[in-house]
Image (spheres, grey):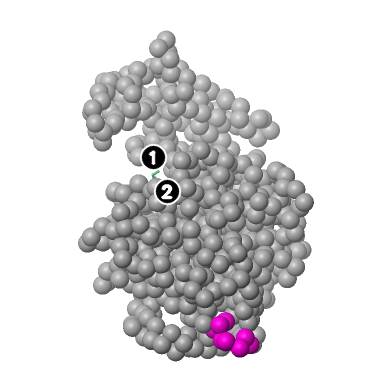
């Protein structure tokens, strides 16, 4: 503790020097301090409002379930995403470690809810025997599966959840509760690490749920999860299945994404995008360790390539045709930032969480240089520094330099960080509510999901860094990994066990059987067929939770729509097919005469998990649809 506060004091004195060195009082004195203080408290409260069972905006959500947003239409975000929830929980745990003791029950509830979720059979797969279901991106708020079409699986979620739970386990260990860490929390973490070790090398959908490929963000967090998972396992004397993959993950992270100027966000996919993407910045702050070296394999904010990447990403939004909101802002100042310039989701606007993340990123790098007492500019990072400190040269700067350039550069970076916060403040409504996005065009109003949990969480973490508050270190003193001479693909088969002590059901005794739904239904181009049913598995007659069938076997001879679905063995199911119309037209259900019933056969835990036990042979009974012609 002593060491950290000493460092903190150094950092603060650098900041203080910054204000003077610049000859003008930097934006802190312009009221940013009071904005940040007020917005931080408000944001934390708004996060809690989005958590079940008692959150005021999360009615019906289970205990510890973090909803993405209370918005139920346009867009419908009233679900829980593994990624959003884990990043939010990491912030909550960090706040708890900083003294917010009332947050403990949220953490405990979260652990319980995640132990259950891990076991829920869903369209990504089942929990047993191969963990595939853990890669499901989102669930209903009552912890049942969501069947609708989605970009799945997403492989960042399990890694992020492990990272959050490891932070809490470390606290338990230092507070005399090692046994609890070992018997209750570790089993949840272990399933997630197994998943990471088994699937890091398989493609999945990215953080924005759009691109099937390999993502920088997922890989970076997978590395962190395996490295600190390994440290935790050793300290409590258990085996970590999957952690042995860390050096290969590190190799992939370092070798595969860098293009000489920035990290291409998604590879192994055919995108037609530049690959400059906010997720490389969000990745850097989620692996941040104040004590890590700038050369660490995890690619920290102070890393030269990461700084070059930051500049490339930010500059891509310095385009007033694309982003009128940023018109006239010089390269020395922060701007409003979106996901990537080609984005069209809700017209592709700036996001609160991304603009906050840019500031957080800079505070992280500042803290690292301050702790290290030196800053090395090389060819790779030179352009980043030149924008904000024109005299920057390729050399190592230290606080003892004659010309006081070290504090000067830190002051410039601080000022730059502050200017992103000022942009954030400018577009935050009076009441402090944070949606997902704010319009890139005048009058720059908030848009897309309201009260986005992640927007609030991102603000709190940024405010922590701005206040000189840092999460515990995770990078081992020897570095996060030594890269092998040659990168190789790898995978360690995971071991998956329901985390019963944390509240998971014993899914060893309730198992699923695969049913293949096949129906002949002639459709027009743009129309889809879904199967809906009375059971939770089939979405309890909710069409937005019905299962989309696949038309890959559709021919002129046989208009086949089909899907193989894992259903709870022994259940009696009523089901019908539904036509999902184009152009926003409502669905068309089969006639009530269809009245289909199926008894799901008992399962055989020893059989091939992909074996299909029943195939329906149905024909659509009811009206046909017609295209809305849009
Ligand atoms: C919903 C996803 O959450 C969002 O990230 C994506 O842009 C849209 N679907 C469009 O694919
Ligand atoms: C869309 C975002 O692209 C994705 O990252 C997020 O998980 C969901 N919305 C829910 O907030």
Is 587 above or below relative to 347?
A: above
Looking at the picture, tell me which residue is in the foreground, 555 or 479: 479
- Locate the C terminus and report the quarter of the image it occupies: top left
Please give the range of residues in magenta. Answer: 400-407
Left or right: residue 188 versus residue 40 is right
Residue identified by numbered label 2 = 140
- Locate the N terminus and report the quarter of the image it occupies: bottom right
Q: Residue 121: which disc?
A: none
Look at the numbered disc 1 and give the secondary structure of its residue: helix
> Real-space Cα distance between discs 2 and 1?
9 Å
Distance from mark 1 CB to nearest ligand 1 atom below 8 Å = no
Residue identified by numbered label 1 = 545
Give whichever of discs 2 and 1 has the lower sequence position: 2
- Figure quadrant of residue 477: bottom right
- Figure quadrant of residue 473: bottom right
Left or right: residue 236 versus residue 91 is right
Spot the residue most to the top: 557
Contact flag, marks 2 and 1 (Cβ < 8 Å) = yes
User: In percent of the image, x 54 and y 50: which residue is there?
Assistant: 264
Judge the density around disc 2: few (<14), some (14-19), many (≥20) Cα neighbours within 10 Å.
many
Looking at the picture, tell me which residue is in the foreground, 3 or 535: 3
Residue 322's x, y, as percent?
Answer: 33, 53
Residue 241's x, y, as percent?
Answer: 72, 52
User: In percent of the image, x 48 and y 53: which residue is there?
Assistant: 276
User: In percent of the image, x 72 and y 47: which residue is there?
Assistant: 487
Look at the numbered disc 2 and give the secondary structure of its residue: loop
User: In percent of the image, x 23 and y 60: which residue is there?
Assistant: 442
Asked whether residue 502 appears in the rendered view, the answer is no
Judge the density around disc 1: few (<14), some (14-19), many (≥20) Cα neighbours within 10 Å.
many
Secondary structure of the magenta portion, mostly? loop
Residue 592's x, y, as percent?
Answer: 29, 24
Left or right: residue 225 versus residue 440 is right
């Amino acid at each position: 503790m002593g060491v950290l506060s000493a460092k903190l004091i150094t950092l603060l004195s650098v900041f203080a020097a910054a204000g003077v060195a610049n000859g003008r009082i930097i934006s802190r004195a312009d009221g940013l301090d009071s904005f940040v203080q007020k917005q931080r408290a408000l944001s934390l409260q708004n996060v809690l409002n989005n958590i079940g069972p008692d959150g005021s905006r999360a009615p019906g959500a289970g205990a510890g379930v973090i909803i993405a947003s209370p918005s139920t239409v346009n867009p419908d975000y009233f679900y829980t995403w593994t990624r959003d929830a884990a990043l939010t929980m990491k912030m909550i745990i960090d706040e708890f470690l900083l003294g917010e003791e009332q947050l403990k029950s949220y953490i405990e509830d979260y652990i319980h809810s995640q132990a259950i979720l891990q076991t829920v059979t869903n369209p990504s797969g089942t929990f047993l025997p191969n963990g595939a279901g853990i890669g499901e991106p989102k669930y209903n708020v009552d912890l049942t599966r969501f069947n609708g079409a989605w970009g799945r699986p997403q492989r960042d979620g399990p890694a992020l959840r492990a990272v959050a739970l490891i932070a809490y386990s470390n606290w338990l260990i230092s507070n005399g509760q090692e046994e609890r860490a070992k018997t209750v929390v570790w089993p949840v973490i272990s399933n997630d690490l197994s998943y990471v070790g088994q699937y890091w090398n398989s493609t999945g959908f990215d953080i924005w749920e759009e691109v099937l490929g390999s993502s920088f963000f997922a890989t970076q967090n997978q590395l962190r999860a395996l490295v600190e998972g390994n440290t935790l396992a050793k300290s409590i004397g258990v085996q970590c299945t999957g952690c042995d993959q860390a050096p290969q993950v590190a190799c992939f992270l370092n070798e595969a994404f860098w293009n000489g100027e920035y990290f291409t966000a998604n590879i192994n996919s055919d995108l037609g995008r530049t690959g400059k993407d906010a997720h490389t910045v969000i990745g850097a702050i989620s692996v941040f360790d104040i004590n890590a070296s700038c050369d660490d394999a995890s690619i920290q904010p102070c890393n030269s390539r990461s700084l070059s990447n930051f500049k490339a990403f930010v500059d891509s939004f310095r385009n007033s045709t694309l982003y009128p909101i940023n018109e006239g802002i010089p390269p020395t100042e922060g701007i409003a930032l979106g996901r990537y310039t080609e984005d069209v989701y809700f017209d592709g606007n700036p996001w609160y969480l991304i603009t906050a993340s840019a500031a957080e990123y800079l505070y992280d790098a500042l803290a690292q240089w301050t702790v290290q007492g030196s800053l090395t500019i090389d060819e790779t990072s030179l352009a980043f520094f030149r924008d904000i400190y024109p005299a920057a040269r390729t050399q190592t700067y230290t606080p003892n330099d004659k010309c006081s350039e070290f504090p000067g550069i830190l002051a410039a970076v601080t000022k730059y960080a502050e200017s992103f916060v000022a942009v954030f403040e400018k577009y935050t409504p009076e009441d402090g509510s944070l949606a997902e996005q704010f319009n890139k065009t005048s009058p720059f109003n908030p848009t897309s999901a309201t009260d986005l949990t992640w927007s609030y969480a991102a603000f709190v973490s940024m405010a922590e860094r701005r206040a000189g508050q840092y999460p515990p270190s995770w990078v081992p003193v020897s570095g996060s990994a030594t890269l092998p001479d040659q990168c190789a693909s790898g995978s360690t088969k995971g071991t998956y066990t329901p985390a019963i002590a944390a509240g998971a059901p014993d899914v060893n005794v309730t198992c699923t059987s695969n049913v293949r739904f096949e129906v002949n239904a002639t459709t027009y181009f743009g129309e889809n067929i879904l199967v809906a049913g009375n059971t939770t598995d089939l979405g309890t007659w909710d069409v937005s939770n019905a299962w989309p069938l696949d038309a890959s076997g559709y021919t002129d001879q046989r208009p086949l729509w089909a899907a193989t679905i894992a259903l709870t063995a022994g259940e009696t199911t009523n089901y019908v097919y539904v036509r999902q119309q184009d152009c926003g037209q409502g669905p068309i259900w089969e006639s009530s005469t269809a009245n289909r019933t199926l008894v799901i056969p008992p399962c055989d835990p020893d059989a091939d998990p992909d074996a299909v036990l029943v195939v329906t042979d149905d024909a659509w009974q009811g009206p046909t649809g017609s295209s809305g012609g849009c």
